């Protein structure tokens, strides 16, 4: 298909392409020309592997939304075909060549950071003192202490203290339950993030079909 038109699309964002569609000729059912079924097939290179994308026909114009995806191969040639169904008849009125590219992104990071300024502490003056010999004092006579009876300790129940401990334990259990819920939510987010780009693209195309047919 040497007469194919070639377009370049940004693989990092959704793209929309449009075709003007004219239906002429005789048909036993004129309503087919006013409401044809249209779709767009996207195939990778010469391989018969690709996707069928929904298309919207309105007032002689066909619009196709090509979703963004990391599954596209940058610089790889893709064949796009507009397909029209009129009753039991099949037409391919347009074919194009598509290439996906990533946009240029320029970033700069600071390599050398400013040297830290260290504060200089003032000079410390050390004063040395000659220790003086302590004057020996006569040791006092040891006093014989009389044994004292052990006090009787009455065990009292502090209701306020026990209530405080119960409230603290309840708060700890509540925080533990909240932490478990947060961990479960993080696991669910990680499982969703680990989906392959192909699965994500299929989900988006399925959602687009539902929105178009709904």
Image: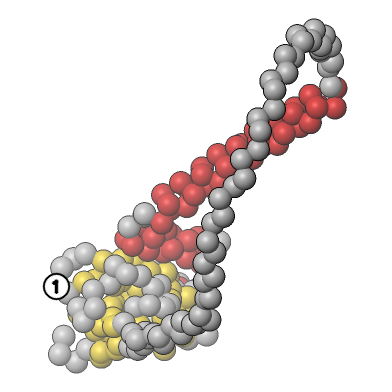
Asked whether, in this view, residue 84 is left or right of residue 121, the answer is: left
Picture residue at 53% right of the left edge, 75% below the top: 125
Q: Is residue 182 above or below residue 130?
A: above
Q: Quadrant of the C terminus?
A: bottom right
Q: Is residue 179 above or below residue 156?
A: below
Q: Quadrant of residue 204?
A: bottom left
Picture residue at 80% right of the left edge, 27% below the top: 161
Residue 18 seen in the current view: no
Q: Quadrant of residue 205?
A: bottom left
Residue 142 seen in the current view: yes
Asked whether, in this view, residue 34 is left or right of residue 6, the answer is: right
- Colour convention: secondary structure
Which of 201/209 is in front?
201
Q: Residues within 10 Å of mark 1 (few under 14, many from 20)?
A: few
Which of 20/44 is in front?
44
Asked whether, in this view, residue 75 is left or right of residue 178, the answer is: left
Picture residue at 23% right of the left edge, 74% below the top: 73
Q: Is residue 161 above or below residue 146?
A: below
Asked whether, in this view, residue 159 is left or right of residue 99, the answer is: right
In the rendering, at what x and y percent does residue 58 appear? Answer: 52, 81
Picture residue at 29% right of the left edge, 83% below the top: 101
In the rendering, at what x and y percent does residue 169 appear? Answer: 69, 30
Q: Quadrant of residue 154?
A: top right
The number of discs equals 1
Badge 1 is on which residue?
Answer: 46
Which of 18/180 is in front?
180
In the rendering, at what x and y percent does residue 168 appear? Answer: 72, 34
Which of 5/72 is in front?
72
Report helix, strand or loop for mark 1.
loop
Q: Quadrant of the N terminus?
A: bottom left
In the rendering, at what x and y percent does residue 114 appear? Answer: 41, 87
């Amino acid at each position: 298909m040497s007469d194919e038109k070639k377009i370049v699309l940004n693989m990092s964002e959704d793209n929309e392409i449009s075709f003007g569609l004219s239906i002429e000729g005789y048909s036993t059912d004129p309503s087919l020309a006013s409401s044809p079924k249209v779709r767009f097939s996207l195939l990778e290179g010469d391989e018969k592997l690709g996707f069928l994308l929904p298309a919207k026909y309105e007032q002689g114009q066909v619009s196709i939304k090509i979703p963004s995806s990391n599954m596209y191969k940058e610089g790889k040639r893709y064949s796009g075909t507009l397909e029209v169904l009129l009753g039991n008849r099949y037409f391919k009125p347009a074919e194009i060549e598509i290439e996906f590219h990533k946009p240029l992104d320029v970033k700069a990071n600071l390599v050398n950071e400013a040297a830290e300024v260290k504060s200089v502490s003032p000079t410390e003056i050390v004063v040395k003192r000659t220790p003086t010999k302590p004057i020996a004092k006569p040791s006092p006579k040891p006093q014989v202490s009389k044994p004292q009876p052990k006090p009787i300790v009455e065990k009292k129940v502090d209701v306020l203290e026990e209530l405080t401990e119960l409230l603290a334990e309840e708060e700890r259990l509540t925080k533990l339950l909240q932490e478990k819920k947060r961990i479960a939510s993080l696991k669910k987010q990680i499982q969703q993030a680990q989906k392959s780009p192909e699965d994500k693209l299929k989900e988006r195309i399925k959602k687009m079909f539902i929105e178009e047919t709904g």
